[in-house]
């Protein structure tokens, strides 16, 4: 479930990046790569889990699925927060710098 | 349990290499004329290494969060809940050497694929098409 949610987040971020290309001011590409990196890593984790559990892997308990779904959504939120911090620090549009100059 | 540490360690190494390459590439830019700068920028390897950095850092950070979620990583020393028990620690090392290494290898393989594809696209863009040659 976590893997699926992260893969969907990666696909959406990639589509948004492609739509806005070649302009990459908002650094959507960074967000997409972050989600793809996590998706690849969870994919490897899923393969090892499948080798260990076999048929049980495809029949998880309802509570486990719900917990994994919450984890997936939290991961997507954390990815967005990291991306937001990067955008605000790099400040590609100079908005933060302008606001700070105005205040000082 | 701590599989994300392997890609994170790779991310540290690739970030250092990226920084070293960036400073070298900037030096080359300065020594050349304006016309060559654009061509050099398209072949900047450090820019492509940044893709790998983003894949590794992003993946490791989100996986670290998953480990915190499951109580395997804690924000105080020794950070790994398994660190207190030698048996658990052996399991951690086993997981790092199997799952962690596979993660790092697969992410790197995907990045190599991305670099190969982008180089092919760049080469195609450099070579004029038959129609372009005829028109010229």
Image (tube, coloured by chain):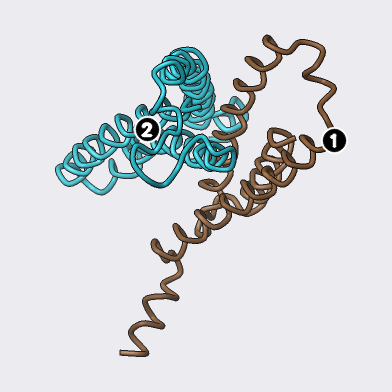
Chain colours: A brown, B cyan
Which residue is more in the foreground, B104 or B22? Answer: B104
**Up/down of B82 relative to B93, above or below:** below
Total residue callouts: 2
Provide the chain ID for the residue under circle 2.
B
Secondary structure of residue under mark 2: helix
Residue at 47%, 36% (x, y): give it.
B60
Which residue is more in the foreground, A96 or A54? Answer: A54
Which residue is more in the foreground, B123 or A35? Answer: A35
Q: Which mark is residue B11?
A: 2
A9 with respect to A103 (left or right): right
Q: Name the mark nearer the viewer: 1 or 2.
A: 1
Question: Residue B97: horizontal and vertical position, in percent?
Answer: 43, 13
B88 with respect to B12 (left or right): right
Question: Residue A63: horizontal and vertical position, in percent?
Answer: 80, 38
Q: Is residue B123 visible?
A: no
**Up/down of A102 relative to B84, above or below:** below
Q: Which residue is mark 1?
A: A62
Residue at 45%, 42% (x, y): give it.
B74
**Up/down of A32 relative to B129, above or below:** below
């Amino acid at each position: 479930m976590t893997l699926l949610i992260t893969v969907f987040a990666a696909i959406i971020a990639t589509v948004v990046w492609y739509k806005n290309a070649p302009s990459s001011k908002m650094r959507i590409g960074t967000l997409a790569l972050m989600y793809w990196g996590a998706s690849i890593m969870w994919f490897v984790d899923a393969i090892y889990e499948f080798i260990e559990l076999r048929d049980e892997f495809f029949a998880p308990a309802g509570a486990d699925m719900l917990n994994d779904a919450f984890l997936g959504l939290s991961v997507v939120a954390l990815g967005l927060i990291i991306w937001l911090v990067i955008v605000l620090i790099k400040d590609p549009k100079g908005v933060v710098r302008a606001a700070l100059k105005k205040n000082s | 349990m701590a599989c994300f540490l392997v890609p994170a360690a790779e991310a540290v190494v690739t970030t250092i290499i990226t920084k070293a390459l960036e400073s070298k590439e900037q030096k080359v830019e300065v020594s050349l004329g304006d016309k060559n700068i654009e061509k050099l920028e398209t072949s900047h390897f450090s820019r492509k290494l940044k893709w790998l950095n983003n894949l590794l850092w992003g993946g490791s950070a989100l996986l670290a969060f998953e480990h915190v979620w499951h109580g395997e990583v804690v924000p105080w020393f020794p950070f790994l809940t398994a660190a207190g028990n030698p048996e658990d620690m052996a399991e951690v090392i086993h997981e790092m050497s199997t799952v962690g290494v596979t993660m790092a290898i697969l992410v790197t393989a995907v990045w190599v694929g991305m670099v190969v594809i982008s180089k092919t696209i760049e080469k195609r863009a450099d070579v004029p098409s038959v129609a372009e040659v005829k028109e010229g």
